[in-house]
Image: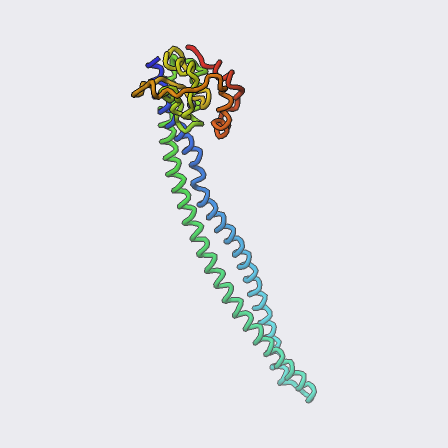
Amino acid sequence: MVEVFDKLRNLQEVLSEKYELQAQIDEAPKLLTSQDELLARLKKEFIEKNGEYDDSKAKVSDLKVKLAQAEAQREKAEKDMDNVATHREYETLEKEINDSKELGHTVRKELEKEEKRLAELNDTLNKCQEMIQSQESELEQSKASLDNEVTQYQAKLTSLEKQEAELSEGIDSEIIFKFKRIVKSKHNKGIVAVKGNVCDGCHMILPAQFANDVHSGEKIVFCPYCSRILYYQEVEGDEEQYYQMDDTGSLADLDDDEFADEEDFDEDEDSEEKRSDENLDF
Ligand SMILES: [Zn+2]
């Protein structure tokens, strides 16, 4: 039995490390989330700005056409002035010249404004593109180094699983199954000492007969309160450490508080009687 307990303690170490590694492997992709999000944001901004740029570009060429038309109109009117015959014709042409001048002036101003905006949008797009590129290469580097890390984790995991198999050898598979579940859910402690008649895992006082079973060390005993495997450990002034407990006091009275925060792992939890019966010989 001592040998089995030693194996279980070693197995506990191996399993804790394994679960920690598995958690790190599972968490790994999440480390890139913020970088992914930033990149997506930049790309969205680029698309938006690119749309604005296209609009502005169309507006500029439209204004250029309008300006050319206004100038052509003015030039034609000026040319027609040479052949003017009546005063009325003169007035009409003069008005045409003035109108087209004014229109040209307005359009030119608008065009200058739009061209300035177009240049600014062009700058913004270039900057945005640079940022996207640098963000992409940063993300690629992060992914590569993370892949590298995960590969190392996985190699370590394989070696831990080998140790796990070796340490589990010769121990009842159902005990191993329950033990693993306890280690996983109880923050790494699956095997604890009984000091006096108190479980060192949950600090509950065990029924005297139960503590005796642990003391005798003839079988694997699970704590009825926290489900951890128990082994006996000598303590100084052993007799005084024995807390007295009314054996008629039922375990059910005690289990409510203790199990309240532990139900997450005991999916097949039925009753205390079942649990006690489950303590397996091997
Ligand atoms: Zn316990």
User: Relative to residue 208, is residue 236 drawn left or right?
Assistant: left
* Image coords of residue 71 (percent x, y): 58, 75
Work out which quarter of the rendered image holds the C terminus and state it: top left
Tell me which image quadrant ligand 1 sits in: top left
State the residue at coordinates (49%, 20%). Answer: 251
Vertical order, 176 against 86 (above or below):
above
* Image coords of residue 20 (percent x, y): 39, 30
Q: Nearer the viewer, residue 250 or 275?
A: 250
* Image coords of residue 91 (percent x, y): 67, 86
Vertical order, 84 against 208 (above or below):
below
Q: Most extreme residue toward the left, as rendered?
A: 236
State the residue at coordinates (54%, 20%). Answer: 270
Work out which quarter of the rendered image holds the N terminus and state it: top left
* Image coords of residue 165 (percent x, y): 38, 18
State the residue at coordinates (41%, 42%). Answer: 140
* Residue 163 shows in the view: no
